[in-house]
Image (cartoon, helix red, strand yellow):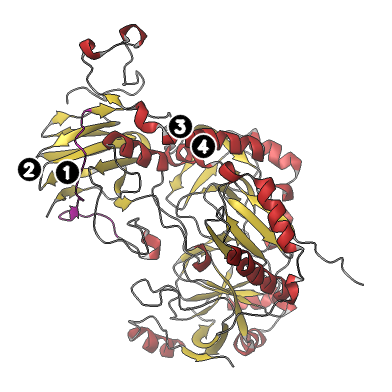
Amino acid sequence: MRGLIARAAGPAMALQDLGRPGFLAHGLTHGGAADRHAVCEGAALLRQAPDLAVLEMVGTGGTFEATEDVRIALTGAVMAAQVDGRALAWNASHAVAKGAQLTIGPTRSGTYGYLHVGGGFAGAAVLGSRATHLSCGLGALVRKGDILPVGQDKGKDVGMTLIPEARLNGGAVRVVPSMQTGDFDPEVRERFENTEFRRDPRANRQGVRMDSDGEGFSNPKALSIVSEVIVPGDIQITGDGTPFVLMAECQTTGGYPRIGTVIPCDLPRVAQAPAGAVVRFAFVTRDEGAAIQARASTALAKLSGAVTPLVRDPSTMQDLLNYQLVGGVVSATDPALDEGE
Amino acid sequence: MQDTPFVPTIRSVGLNGLLVTFDDTATDAANRAAIAFRSAVDAQGWPEISESSSTLVSAFFRVDLAEYGFDRLSARLSDVLGSRDWTAASLPAGRALWTIPAVFGGPRAPQLTEAAEAAGLSVAQAQADLTSARLRVLTLGFAPGQPYLGTLGEAWNIPRQVGLSPNIPAGALVAAVRQICLFTKDTPTGWRHVGQSAFACFRPSSDTPFPLSPGDEVQFTSVTAAELERIEAHNGDGAGGALREMLE
């Protein structure tokens, strides 16, 4: 069988894809990758469809052996990666020969790292998706000894890279007003916008808790509101006033009020913020948010055009003077991306 | 004294869709309206709507608002809203009545006493209420196949507790705001844990992964903790000792 054998497995690796839409009415949430942007980056690097399954890794990855020659790409949270001891660039595609040992981890920056394979991870889909949703009993964590089937690969390109959208260290996150924003006093909304939050260590694929100093953001009348639809990105305020940003595996409905909703293109920034990273929320109007999101969707659709060869041969560079030769694809602030171990 | 009637609202939910809400409290009429309105809009097959659902008092239409915009779809939904009295809509056909055994109080459902106090009832009265009411599946949500059941008497309009109980188990009956929720899976919650069943609301390997449907009716019967343990010992199919019969 064409596949990757997990010779060693970190504690939190599972297959994901773009999720399982169409079951909201049955109470089954969309799910899928925590960082959808990373899924699209990997698909662009391998020049394949973004709906193929990928391996999502938290904290560390594992050691994998290919049963046949495969192409891989690495995106999202930056992790150490080697093939047979040779360091691999992150945000890039590579060839992995049959029998070679691919080692990934630990994480250097961000939270969710992704391993993509040419042809995508195969195996049975449940309710139309290969996304793992542990709390609903769909799929399972990858364990040592598992063989992950890999689909047929029509592509050939490897050694390609792209400059990822910066999103691994928290920062400003844009929020649109949502159905219950008006239930919060203007003073509370303003204080929410002016608060520097820290991403709590208590975070998972369902939600990310945001810590802050000072009083919470609760609204006494909101404890008895009618349970209502939840969408990923909703910022729920629990009874004690703590905000949670609801993520890919959020519930379909819930009774805590939402102060606003993170726009979809900024949600990977929340997902990737490591514990302790500073996050600030800024309200934009619904129309402004829609325009920002539309531009982001357009950029995402053109991602394959941003893919460039990892090692450039100057003789093939038509516009040499336009290249920024010092920085290249490696950020000066992300150490040891490309150096030997 | 007459309350001012609630005027249905159309609101955006993030950039992910539009929500049509028929009341600000969980009334049966609003729930029926939400189910009927969703069904009527779905029947029109608008290409902008990628899926829909109904909640306790609202119909939700998932639409990419960055692509299609809010105003135009809101106007079209408003037209459908004005076309008839949606609170006069009838319940769906083909509904089932489920009789589900559960333990009330004791170590398996430790918050019955607390919930009874919040409702101003004795524990015996509270248990009688929970086992005599014929409850209706108002909506499925929060977790796959998980029903919100209603509607209990006014005494049960108890708020969620401040702070979450860390982990209430699958099959739990939890109470708040005149409803019972029957948990699909272990869940942190602000609702109070008043009963415990062995009924599986989501059966992914079954031909019917979502056994309950909106409009179904549910009657709980009280069993002892020992009886529940016997049910749990032979519960491979997740039925939890429940009986299903068709209504009408």
Q: Which class describes the residues within 10 Å of circle 1: few (<14), some (14-19), or many (20+)?
A: many
- Mark 2 or mark 4, whichever is nearer to me: 2
Mark 3 or 2 closer to N-term? 2
Image coords of residue B215 (percent x, y): 59, 79
Q: Amino acid at mark 3?
A: Ala
| Badge 4 element | strand
Category of crowding for the residue at label 4, using alpha-carbon neighbours closer than 10 angstroms: few (below 14), some (14–19), many (at least 20): many
Label 2 SS: loop
Type of amino acid at the residue the image marks with label 2: Gly
Residue A42 to residue B92: above or below:
above
Q: Are marks 3 and 1 on the same chain?
A: yes
Q: Main secondary structure of the magenta part?
A: loop
Residue holding disc 4: A198
Q: Chain of mark 4?
A: A
**Which chain hosts label 1?**
A
Q: State the CA–CA distance, disc 4 to disc 3.
A: 29 Å
Q: Nearer the viewer, mark 2 or mark 1?
A: 2
Q: Residues within 10 Å of mark 3 (few under 14, many from 20)?
A: few
For the N terminus of chain A, the quadrant is bottom left
Residue denoted by label 2: A99
* Badge 3 vs badge 1, beta-carbon distance below 8 Å: no
> Disc 3 to disc 2, how far (Cα)?
37 Å
Give left or right: position of A78 versus A85.
right
- Mark 2–mark 1 Cα distance, whole angstroms, equals 12 Å
Question: Label 4 vs label 1: CA separation?
Answer: 32 Å
State yes or no: discs 2 and 1 in contact (Cβ < 8 Å). Answer: no
